Amino acid sequence: MAEITATISRPQRWDVPFDDKMDATAVDRLLAIPPFSRIDASQFPKSTPLRDILLNDTSLRSFRKGELIVREGDYGNSAFFIIQGSVKVTLGKDAIPAALLGRRETRKKNFLETLGQLWRNPSFPEVRDTARYQAARPGARRGDTTPPLPAPAASRHPFGRQAEARTGAVFLSDVPAVLKGGTATLTAGVFFGEIAALGRTPRTATIFADEASELLEIRWQGLRELRLRAPEIKQFVDTNYRKYSLENHLRETEYFRDLPPAELKIVADQTRFETYGGFDWHTDYKKNRDISPVERLRGEPVIAEQGQYANGLILIRAGFARLSQKYNHGERTASYLARGQMFGFKEIAHNWRTKESVALRYTLRALGYVDVLVVPTAIVEQYVLPKLAPAALPPPIVTAEEDDNPISPLQQVSGKLPTDFVEFLVDNRFINGRAAMLIDLERCTRCDDCVRACAASHDNNPRFVRHGQQLGSYMVANACMHCLDPVCMIGCPTGAISRDATGGQVVINDTTCIGCSTCANSCPYHNIQMVEIRDAAGELLLDQEQRPVTKAAKCDLCLEQPAGPACVRACPHDALARLNIRDTDTLAAWLQR
């Protein structure tokens, strides 16, 4: 075998800009508009200057009246800023019938394509079609004097975007007639979509153009840099959220749902924004994963502490928090809270109803980055509790038994899961997993049919390792869990790793991956591998500096396979499952088969 058959250019961060139509004139125009005009460009490093972020990480988008901008339920990788015009935000789940939203499903392989994998898969590992790398580089990197390569017409995206591809505009021809819920209007000078973009979560509303409008779309890598280096942007975004979204957020919480608009506004005005931990929480997690539980708890920021007065109702807006309780000379984990859950309501309701003073019975700590809303206790007592029916109030706290025997949501199922299993899930942060691979080692015969099935579905390259953290006879294998908070996406400089817009699977764009290993190093679970790639003849590919070209590879949950994950289907002993760890009923049922 020859040492090398081809030399290819190693991709760089801005080889493929978000919109190849952005130019210096467009950037100048943006820098004349608040809040961008208030940014101090000297606060940005030379490697990522402000102008280059706006040039390469943004896109000027035009929408016609009635055209969809984002859909409820789709996963967002970008935020929007309204330059001209206005947009309509639907309020309430499924406010627009799904049939009218034009959601495009991911293409699945047909029967013949699936069967053909058995004999068409290459004999060599990690084979790539090198022609696609050239086709995906229609122009040279900005500042590069090398003549650009012509791109096939079919490969050019109208906005040069890599994710949430817009293959055809979707319009609502009779908007008022199809809306089931209320709406809100956002006008020029407003940001939206930043929570879904930065939190890597589904869109919570459907938004469409209310008139002919011009929007600036910012992919989340650029938005992260702007928030980090320009406090003006963070303050502007938070102010926008308080003005336009906070009341809707509160209205989606059961205890605030029926408040009159005037009172809901008072609650929103008094609500505090608080953030704990770092956005890049995975670095601290990986550094501290091998220390003792006591030391780990000490390093987790305290949001509210057991024994203190409940001075506010805490709503988790993003991230995870550990719920722990004093036990003997230490603490034990009782549960965890995630986005949409609250803390402190039982104590506040008890104190208001009985006129007694009961302190917080648990300590709430940030597991990495946690974004919370705090509604002051006095506001809850004045506007929320009097409106609730007696049956809606939690029962009074009458004994200390509950303090001695904390019951986790994971334990409120048939058979009750033991505390050590809950701590295993929390301490290893498997609570993040939407599709964790669990293996019952008592049933597993180590036949490796799951590995072979995975390889057959991925060009003879298995995308997981049958190895991982164990508790008793159960293992969480080293396979991508398609996390609720996929921190592997945080540092990717090109946006090559992102969510599938419809299913939420975390996938890697092999074409734009530059092999920097940032995602593999960021993944707290060691579920991403860096592989050296080959051409069709099996020869290793080298870059222009004669170094092997590497790409990130991981489980994609068999996104293109018609029957779903091949590993699950191939197991002859029902020893393997892909489970959402937060779906406690399904988890308990599988463990207790």
Image (cartoon, helix red, strand yellow):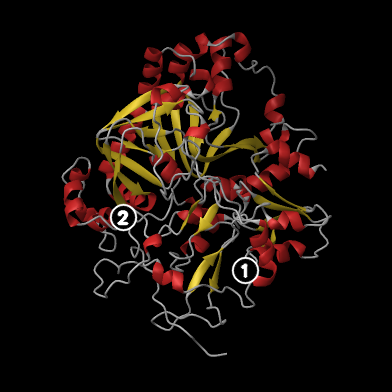
> Which numbered marker is on residue 335?
none
For the N terminus, give its image quadrant. bottom right
For the C terminus, give its image quadrant. top right
Q: Amino acid at mark 2?
A: Asp
Q: Nearer the viewer, residue 283 or 577?
A: 577
Q: Nearer the viewer, residue 264 or 359?
A: 264
Confirm whether residue 148 shows in the render: yes
**Picture coordinates of residue 270, whole percent (x, y):** 37, 22
Instruction: Please say if the residues under marks 1 and 2 sit with CB atoms less than 8 Å apart.
Output: no
**Picture coordinates of residue 110, whole percent (x, y):** 64, 56
Q: Is residue 78 above or below residue 515?
A: above
- Residue underneath mark 1: 459
- Residue underneath mark 2: 19
Q: Is residue 118 above or below residue 473?
A: below
Secondary structure at badge 2 equals: loop
Q: CA distance from mark 1 to mark 2?
A: 32 Å
**Picture coordinates of residue 8, whole percent (x, y):** 41, 78
Which residue does the image show at 71% across and 30% down from the upper left?
Answer: 404
Q: Nearer the viewer, residue 266 or 291?
A: 266
Confirm whether residue 375 shows in the render: no
Secondary structure at badge 1 equals: loop
